[in-house]
Every structure is written in C-alpha cells, then in structure tokens.
Amino acid sequence: MYEFVGKASPFLVLALLALLDGALQLCILQPSRISPESTKATPVSTLLRDPYILVAAGALCFSNMGVAMLEPTLPIWMLQTMCSPQWQLGMAFLPASISYLIGTNLFGILANRMGRWLCSMIGMAVVGISLLCVPLATNIYGLIGPNAGLGFAIGMVDSSMMPIMAQLVDLRHTSAYGTVYAIADVAFCMGFAIGPSTGGAIVRALGFPWLMVMVGALNVAYAPLCCLLRSPPAAEESMAILSQECPTKPKNYTLRGAQREFPLTEAENTE
C-alpha cells in the first residue's frame, strides 16, 4: 500500500480500524457502575519475586524479541543483499503475520492437550531455529519459510504462556489476575523495546547474520527452562483454600429393603 496507493494509505486504514474497534466496544461492552467484591490482588513486588512467574515472563519477552529485532533490521539487510523493491520490504513479514494468526488459534486448544509447558518449549526452540535460518535466504522467497515458522512459533508461546500465568497465580498466590497479566504485558513490551534499540547497534558492530545467531541461540538456550513450568509447586495457603472450596465428605449408602437371595425361584418371579 505504501508504494502503490500512497504514503498515507496504511495509516488511514489503521485509523479506520481503530475507530471501528472503539465504536464496537462502546456499543457492545456494558461496564457496571457497581464493582462486585473481588479477591485482593497480590502485590507486583511479590509476583516479581516468584521464579516461576519470571520464567514465564522471560519466555514471552525473548520469543517476541526476535521479531522485534527483525522489523527494523531485515528491510535494510534486504536492500543491501537482495536489492529488493520497496513493496517486498513489507511483504516479507506477511508469512509471519498469517502463521501467527493460525498458531494462536490452533494451539489455544492443542496446548491444553499436549501440555502448555511443552508447547512453549517447542515454540521457543522453533523461534531460535527460524531466526538462525533467516540469514541463509538469498531472495524474498527464501524468507517465507523462516518468517512463517517464526510467527507460528511465537503464536505457540503466546497462547500457552498467558494461561500458565493465570495458573501460577491460582496455585501460588491469590486468584486475582490483573497484576500477573500486567506483568505479562510488560514482558511483551520489553521485548519490543529492547529488540529494536539493541538490534541496530549489534548490526552496526557485528552484522545482521550475527544478530540472528545471537537472538536465535538465546531462544534455544532459554527453551529448556519451560520444563520448570510442568508442575509448579503450590503454596500452602492456596492448597488450604482449594481444599475448603472443594470439600470431600464421605457418604454412607444403605439398602432400604432387606437383601434378597439370588437366583429367584419361579414362584417369586410371578409375585
């Protein structure tokens, strides 16, 4: 759109979509004036001292940091090595966007069956491998596979880590999710803040291929830490609350009538 329609066209489309989204929220969402009583949220400082929450937040940060580094550096590298036209600079990210849409919707269901920790670990490993394959491309068609794998793998991590965050709060803290989701959003934003700011400096000092090697190796090395999220221990207070909410009381069952002997005779059957 930037090349064929005009420089203002992409921004006008985004502004129109934002206005449409805001109008739909005003029409559909009906916030209540009286807020219901809710559980007091755990302080952010307490959650940030939880190693399991830090592992989950790190997975969100590092997996999204790869695509954040690609966005400012890949177009420049394509101009230098492929002499790509301007329309290809944006089209290079289309496979990642489509595969991310597929991955988030697909693994929202599959991650619950195969294990969210395993889905996240595989996703981070695929993110690292895809980033390592990006410098091997010689034209835009060679970028389709790595970028598609990158978007698909990030979708695996994102769709798995958000439920894991809620599970960790249920097991180890109080069941109030606003604070832990704020930490997840901060981790996501840190990836997109650190990625472009450091990616340009690394490309200038070492080159684009070494940048991909570094961030790819970081994701592959971080992936085994997701094993810690397989069965995180629950806090004693949370276990006590769960046992109070789901009590198990023994029940005794007695027969109302006298027990009869089997098999019955023909006379008893006629009765």
Image: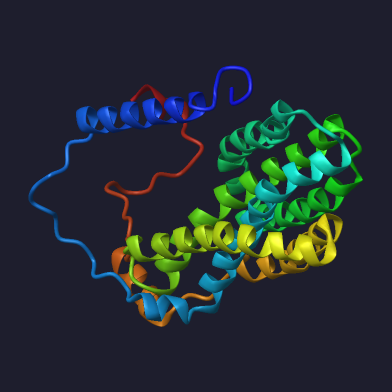
Percent from the top left, x then y, of residue 261? 45, 44
Q: Where, quadrant-wise, is the N terminus in this rendering?
A: top right
What residue lies at 42% left-to-right and 75% top-to-bottom? 47
Percent from the top left, x then y, of residue 266? 46, 25
Q: Is residue 104 visible?
A: yes
In the visual, does 20 lie left or right of 147?
left
Which residue occupies the foreground of this view, 107 or 206? 206
In the visual, does 165 lie left or right of 239?
right
Percent from the top left, x then y, of residue 68? 63, 52
Q: Write down the quadrant of residue 180 in the picture.
A: bottom left
Q: Write down the quadrant of residue 46 in the picture.
A: bottom left
Q: Is residue 250 visible?
A: no
Q: Residue furthest left?
A: 34
Residue 50, compared with residue 73, is above or below; it is below
Q: Write down the quadrant of residue 175 in the picture.
A: bottom left
Which residue occupies the foreground of this view, 175 or 205? 205
What residue lies at 55% left-to-right and 21% top-to-bottom? 6
Colouring method of the image = rainbow
Percent from the top left, x then y, of residue 59? 62, 62
What residue lies at 79% left-to-right and 33% top-to-bottom? 144
